[in-house]
Image: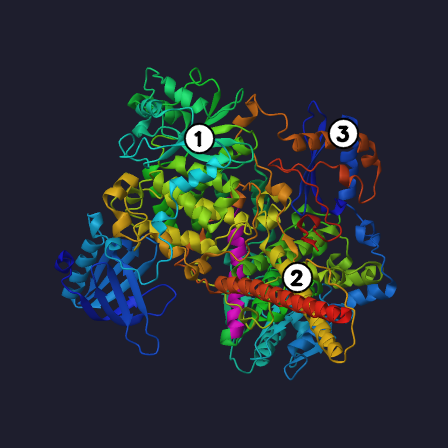
Amino acid sequence: MEFAELIKTPRADNVILHRPFYLAVEGTLCLTGHHLIFSSRRQDNAEELWLLHSNIDSIEKRFVGSLGTIIIKCKDLRIIQLDIPGMEECLNIASSIEALSTLDSVTLMYPFFYRPMFEIIEDGWRSFLPDQEFELLSSVTDEWRLSCINKEFSVCPSYPPVVIVPKSIDDEALRKVAMFRHGSRFPVLSYYHKKNGMVMMRSSQPLTGTNGRRCKEDEKLINATLRPGKRGYIIDTRSLNVAQQARAKGGGFEQEAHYPQWRRIHKCIERFNILQESLIKLVEACNDQSHNMDRWLSKLEASNWLTHIKEILTAACLAAQCIDREGASVLVHGTEGTDSTLQVTSLAQIILDPRCRTIRGFESLVVREWLQAGHPFQQRCAQSAYSNSKQKWEAPVFLLFLDCVWQILRQFPCSFEFNEQFLIMLFEHAYASQFGTFLGNNENERSKLKLLQKTMSLWSWVNRSEELSKFQNPLFEANSLVIWPSVAPQSLQLWEGIFLRWNRPSKFLDEAHEEMISIIKYNKELQAKVNALRRQLAEMETDDRMQENL
Amino acid sequence: VLHSQISSIEKQATTATGCPLLIRCKNFQIIQLVIPQERDCHDVYISLIRLARPVKYEELYCFSFNPKLDKEEREQGWKLVNLHEEYNRMGIPNNYWQISDVNRDYGVCDSYPTEVYVPKSATAHIIVGSSKFRSRRRFPALSYYCKDNNASICRSSQPLSGFSARCLEDEQMLQAIRKANPGSDFIYVVDTRPKLNAMANRAAGKGYENEDNYSNIKFQFIGIENIHVMRNSLQKMLEVCELKSPSMSDFLWGLENSGWLKHIKAIMDAGIFIAKAVAEEGVSVLVHCSDGWDRTAQVCSVASLLLDPYYRTMKGFMVLIEKDWVSFGHKFNHRYGNLDGDPKEISPVIDQFIECVWQLMEQFPCAFEFNERFLIHIQHHIYSCQFGNFLCNSQKERRELKIQERTYSLWAHMWKNRADYLNPLYRSDHSQTQGTLRPQMAPCNFLYKFWSGMYNRFEKGLHPRQSVTDYLMAVKEETQQLEEELEVLGEKLANLQKSQLTDNKVKSKQQDGSKRLGLSTSNNNLANTPQEYSNDLKSFPSRSPSQGDEEDSALILTQDNLKSSDPDLSANSDQESGVEDLSCRSPSGGGCLPSEDSGKDSDEAVFLAV
């Protein structure tokens, strides 16, 4: 096995582990193909730390005499320090970690080696199939059909094999539309609003180019989603300026003249390295312990992270507003339709659709609107805030989405079935996981990797009652309404659960959470007791009456 | 809106619809009235200006406010908080501390209470001597005493040391404070001012203690800025709060630029320093600033709150405000502009203390018996002048006005409604309610947050639409009902079993079925109203007629009402006048009609459908 070649020193003793808010611990460090394992030898309080190599974002080494120090910065934003005696051991371990945390081949990743230690009750790979989704849809409308046009990923490499399109548009027309859209991502159904029958579609930009090319089939397709005499909105997630510039590269936007029934709104959502830099600056500010109050606020401001949150949420709210309040259908796209587009369509559904605020509904949303919709997880989540690589395709798009969900959850603490931990868990697994769910950039790559056969789905693990109980929100009361979050700066906050997770003691907040759970648990117990007594009483009374009648 | 809440009135340029009047309130509410006739508007303006700035105490609301309580109930109300009992609770008088009557007729210091607690070894001669060496004769007196280790917090004003003056009695006074804590051989003297300010004071014959002249003191500056800096800081922050649809950068930059949170942190840091000295080092502390009635009050009360869980209960918090603020002559009248006075005297001193408490509540969610609403209502009533507690500048003035005979106490009113102010996470046997609170010191800037619940409190649209506190309070209430029912059912069952045995039938009433209470804490109307997410939407022609009807018609309605009620408004000096007709447009456009006079937020009520 080639891992063995990468591990020159598999084990080091008398290593000291430093973490913020914990006392330093002495113990043994072991390296395996996929894990860094630290175990303290103290009998009374044996402690083990298992860290996936793929969770390691960057490592630094320092030497003082023959004592080496490795600082490991993780993709989940944690920073740990290991003091390793012996120059050679330290160097060996550092280079092994470096190599093992940056394996090129996906098939060497841990999910391909992981063997679950739990009983699989439900195969997560089969939990959210497009057919099931379509079945739900066809129970309320017959205006849509399931198209298998992309069966071999032959029309659009980043789309799933089956997509939902207007019934009146045949596959031939779809093929033509695909030619007219960036990366062949033709408009498909993202969400159907049962309340008024309005829909949200998503696509990539139209390839109008500088000479204003048009495509009759494209026009026909999106018009097919409108009711007679009604109009729709196109939400372009780029500024007008950027959209205009895109024409020079063959892209562009829908011209009013060709789409008279549609009104275009430009909402600027940043992309790629701007987001990555924002994350890096934010995490730097959160980790900087030296500065004073003023510096903290200005650094928070300079990171622009909350500005991005506000932009994304605003665009999503706008899409939801068009659908629910204006009674109009909506088409959302940016350039490729794999990033900001998905942020907007998925958040709009959380606002509009109570189902997306349940655990299962949210999982289904992540599967539909992120995994199947072809968000390139592997590229975007290759590195996190401590990376030095600065690759163009790395961007915390999914993390921004989760942060926006957290903002809504904070504003509607009783309307979500899941809690903050659930969102944090998804963040962790998107960046490093034992499960295959977030591997690959689209369904096409996943099928080539044979993930279904060779790896375990995250959902198989999450959807067991032992795990689910950790992610349930005790305050949840089903709320069937549309929920409109506030996007005012006063209403948006730094997501401490992610960004300050490792640099603040959370004891008092955890205690408060426990207190909350126990208050609700006690209430439920009492309810059960009262109900049982009532029943018993009622039974005795009937007995009594029967005896009387005899 | 109470006239006493009005902070400023601004007449804006006349528009087609009328003459707008912008009213800013001390509880951070902003009201815009549009009055069709300019003359009426001017009349309203002039009347409000006069009414908002009363010149005599007798004009204030509390002298006409009548909650329909009899004399006895009123007297009971004033007895709810008793400082004599409070010092007894601390264990005083004892071997080291005694009550002194040296100030019985306010003869020594007219801004101090008649009853002051001083070290036993401090004779009247020492006290009087020391008082002559202290600004406004505010000599060192006991604020808090820690039974467990004899360490204490004393407070005073700055010494009149100039560049070299000394006072033997003052030195003896500090010595006496040190001796009252036999476990420690020194005391801290904490000057809460920035060093520069303190040094500047020396030129005016005031200043700070010279370590060389006093035996065994450790002197410490803690840079809290003065009332003028704080007033400007709040002003700047409120400007940020008022911005119409600000960007994230506008907001964060403005917040930073106001320096508000930096000042809050400075006050907290001072409190934490003192609490640590007392609890961990067992060293007594003497705190002062310039006159010892603003920063000193803030810092002493924050430290007491950290040290003693009692002050984190509802009753204890009332006691704390009475002790460190009311009795020691915090100038409520000047600071909060109850009567027309020098605008330069106005400053949000107690507001900052209240915010410090909120910041602590955020960090220690289980540590306080009361909730955010409690703090907000106290803030409201400090300005409302509906109750007599916070009138005047000193105990002496209040006694002369016979406040207790002529007005009612806020504490009794709040105590009566205490169920509304409970923190559902509080449990008296929880670890956070024991002993000293130790907030994190080092990298803790991010722990201090903007308090939108206070400064944007009338913009309901900005706040979480569902309140965890209200939800949990409803659950707890239901739990209590369940407990009661369980007992009743248990008895019934026992009776039934007994009666079955004796073959006696008991006709039992059917319990009124469905007992599962529907808990709904979300303000659905609000939750179901989208904000302005884009200006582009307005111009879209195919807006279906049914959309947004509610908002539109509501707007027309308020304007109509306003027109008709307008003449009354200017003539009516009744406190409640026109409340229903006011169109309170908040800056972001969300309208709401808050009325807090009852001391209860009806908007936030929990709906329990049985």
Horizontal and vertical percent for residue A532? 63, 67
Mark 3–mark 2 Cα distance, whole angstroms, equals 43 Å
Task: Write the residue at 76% across / 44% down.
Answer: B3
* For marks 3 and 2 on the same chain, the one whose residue lies earlier in the sequence: 2
Q: Which residue is mark 3?
A: B560
User: Mark 3 against mark 2, which lies toward the viewer?
Assistant: 2
**Vertical order, A490 against B538 (above or below):** below
Q: Is disc 2 surrounded by few (<14), some (14 to 19) or many (20+) residues within 10 Å?
A: many
Question: What amino acid is at disc 2?
Answer: Glu
Horizontal and vertical percent for residue A281? 36, 46
**Contact flag, marks 3 and 1 (Cβ < 8 Å):** no
Say which mark, if any, is on residue B478: 2
Horizontal and vertical percent for residue B141? 65, 71
Choose top left, top right, bottom left or bottom right for residue A448. Answer: top left
Where disc 1 sits, the SS reads: strand
Horizontal and vertical percent for residue A204? 36, 29
Residue A442 visible, this orientation? no
Magenta-highlighted residues: B254-279
Q: Which residue is mark 1?
A: A144
Indicate left or right for A296 with A543 as reference: left
Indicate left or right for A88 with B193 as reference: left
Task: Write the residue at 53% across / 82% down.
Answer: B183
Pinpoint the chain carrying mark 3.
B
* Quarter the C terminus of chain A occupies: bottom right
The one nearer the camera, B170 or B52, is B52
Q: Is disc 3 surrounded by few (<14), some (14 to 19) or many (20+) residues within 10 Å?
A: few
Magenta span: predominant SS is: helix
